[in-house]
Image (cartoon, grey):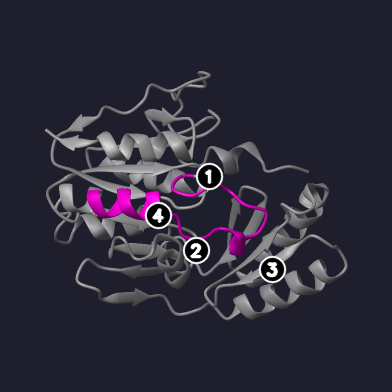
């Protein structure tokens, strides 16, 4: 079946490049704020979510970066906030989890969406589906349900068909990702999270840069662009709203060590 092209390109300008490589982002930028995805950007992708753990270099880079940018660094991830803190060792306070459905401001206040009633049905359906297919993993995020098939990519079409059927039946928002189908409470995404951060201190009045690798990050790329900044796509080039690119986690960390405010 595959993910339809209109899903992949949703909201993307028609003139976007399909070039094999995007130019790297500059090392020196005017009063910037950085919004960083976690998996595939700050941490390598792993067979299961639990397999990703803290890394001394990552935590050190994030702490130094936050200090250089006067706190204008936020992690914007599909993981819950507690998972972001476990992996990043709370090296930065501002964070958004579950694709914008949970957000922690720079002063530590937490804003969370109320779970959609369809999430419980989605979790149960995903669990029943996974029980019959070894290698699949279900995540219950309370406000969202995720079905990971990295352990058996052959299940992609069946997982997508199930997720689409559930989305139509429950009203949940379908959020495809890398070897995962997620159904989430409607009303927020990484773009809305970035926009909310940009209305608050210490981000207000700065230039936003969103760094991400997945389809879910396209919302953040477009939001950054709309606010005078840009997106940075990590990994393989594809149709994207990002203007710049980096090859992988190592290159991201190298760049974060160099980046400075003009």
Q: Quadrant of the N terminus?
A: top right
Q: Nearer the viewer, mark 1 or mark 4?
A: 4
Q: Nearer the viewer, mark 2 or mark 4?
A: 4
Mark 3–mark 4 Cα distance, whole angstroms, equals 29 Å
Q: Earlier in the sequence, mark 3 or mark 4?
A: 4
Q: Residues within 10 Å of mark 4 (few under 14, many from 20)?
A: few
Mark 1–mark 2 Cα distance, whole angstroms, equals 15 Å
- Residue 79 disc label: 2
Residue 31 painted magenta:
no
Residue shown at 34% from the left, 68% from the top = 103
Q: Quadrant of the C terminus?
A: top left
Q: Is residue 150 above or below residue 245?
A: below
Q: Nearer the viewer, mark 1 or mark 3?
A: 3
Q: Residues within 10 Å of mark 3 (few under 14, many from 20)?
A: many
Q: State the image coordinates of residue 99 (x, y, percent, origin top left).
A: 46, 60
Q: Is residue 105 above or below residue 210?
A: below
Q: Earlier in the sequence, mark 2 or mark 4?
A: 4
Q: Residues within 10 Å of mark 2 (few under 14, many from 20)?
A: many
Residue shown at 18% from the left, 56% from the top = 71
According to the image, label 4 marks what residue?
A: 56
Query: Mark 1 and 3 residues: CB-CB less than 8 Å, in contact?
Result: no
Q: Secondary structure at mark 3?
A: strand
Query: Mark 3 and 4 residues: CB-CB less than 8 Å, in contact?
Result: no
Q: State the image coordinates of residue 111 (x, y, percent, origin top left).
A: 33, 75
According to the image, label 1 marks what residue?
A: 215
| Residue 85: quadrant of the picture | bottom left
Q: Earlier in the sequence, mark 1 or mark 2?
A: 2
Query: Which range of residues does the magenta coloring cover?
Result: 41-64
């Amino acid at each position: 079946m595959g993910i339809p092209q209109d899903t992949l390109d949703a909201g993307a300008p028609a003139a976007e490049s399909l070039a094999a490589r995007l130019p790297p982002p500059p090392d020196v930028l005017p009063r910037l704020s950085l919004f960083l995805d976690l998996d595939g950007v700050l941490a390598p992708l792993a067979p299961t979510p639990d397999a990703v753990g803290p890394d001394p270099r990552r935590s050190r880079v994030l702490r130094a970066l936050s200090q250089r940018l006067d706190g204008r660094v936020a992690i914007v991830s599909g993981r819950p906030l507690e998972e972001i803190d476990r992996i990043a060792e709370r090296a930065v306070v501002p964070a958004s989890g579950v694709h914008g459905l949970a957000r922690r401001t720079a002063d530590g206040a937490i804003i969370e969406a109320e779970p959609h009633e369809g999430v419980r049905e989605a979790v149960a359906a995903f669990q029943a589906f996974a029980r019959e297919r070894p290698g699949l993993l279900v995540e219950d995020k309370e406000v969202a349900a995720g079905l990971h098939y990295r352990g058996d990519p052959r299940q992609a079409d069946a997982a997508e068909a199930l997720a689409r059927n559930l989305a139509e039946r429950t009203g949940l928002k379908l959020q495809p990702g890398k070897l995962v189908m997620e159904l989430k409470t409607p009303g927020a995404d990484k773009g809305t999270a970035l926009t909310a951060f940009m209305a608050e201190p210490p981000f207000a009045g700065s230039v936003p840069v969103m760094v991400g690798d997945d389809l879910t990050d396209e919302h953040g790329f477009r939001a950054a662009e709309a606010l005078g900044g840009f997106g940075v796509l990590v990994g393989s080039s594809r149709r994207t709203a990002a203007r710049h690119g980096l090859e992988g986690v190592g290159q991201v960390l190298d760049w974060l060590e160099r980046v400075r405010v003009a």
